[in-house]
Amino acid sequence: MSPETIFRIHLALGYVPWLLWLNAYAWPRLKSMDRIDAQRAIATLHSFRFFGLVFIVPGVVGVNLPADFATFAAYGDFATGVLAMLALLTVRLRPLFWLFVVAFNLVGTVDIVVDYYHGNQVGLAALAGELGATYAIPIIYVPLLMITHVVAFSLLLRPRRDATAALAGAPAS
């Protein structure tokens, strides 16, 4: 099997264990949590995206990794991580917290989608060995990040429990 085929299999199968984990453990827990606590849990995970800067560290990735791919991926992750940290730091300032929650999820989702697109455009699968030590990032970490962005948006779009209860005539909890 070619390295390109192995990389494509890894990309696809990287989602399977995380989706199984989400279904069995994370989704039931997150949807039962307070909206703010659920978003804080997701923001905490994404606050580690500063690690994406490793894509531009010489010696960690191969010299033939396309620089424009590596640079966009690195700074997209970095921006998302900083926005997630800002969400965590502003949890007591609710309007700012929600602004940063939306911002890190939008920026992070766009980053991943553009990285997938750009990686396909530059033939990243054929150059997978050039990822060097960062090979595990798109295989193990990125699927979890993308899945949690979808979860975050899903939670953002759900009606608030206290608002729903008030509409039904029940006392808010």
Image (cartoon, rainbow, N blue to C red):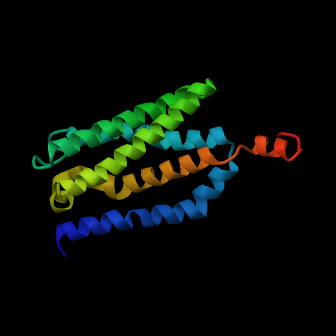
Q: Residue sitting at 65 percent across and 54 percent down?
A: 29
Using the image, determine if residue 118 lies above or below residue 3. above
Using the image, determine if residue 162 lies above or below residue 131. above
Q: Position of residue 120 (x, y in %)?
A: 23, 57
Q: Residue reaching furthest top?
A: 93
Q: Residue reaching furthest bottom?
A: 1
Q: Position of residue 125 (x, y in %)?
A: 21, 61
Considering the image in quadrants, where does the C terminus appear?
Answer: top right
Left or right: where 169 falls relative to 85? right
Q: How many numbered discs?
A: 0
Left or right: where 103 falls relative to 155? left
Q: Residue sitting at 22 percent across and 39 percent down?
A: 71
Q: Quadrant of residue 6?
A: bottom left
Left or right: where 109 falls relative to 53? right
Q: Residue sitting at 63 percent across and 27 percent down?
A: 94
Q: Residue sitting at 53 percent across and 44 percent down?
A: 42
Q: Position of residue 88 (x, y in %)?
A: 54, 31
Considering the image in quadrants, where does the N terminus appear?
Answer: bottom left
Q: Quadrant of residue 140?
A: bottom left
Q: Quadrant of residue 51?
A: top left
Q: Residue reaching furthest left?
A: 63
Using the image, determine if residue 28 lies above or below residue 42. below
Left or right: where 68 falls relative to 158? left
Q: Position of residue 75 (x, y in %)?
A: 29, 36
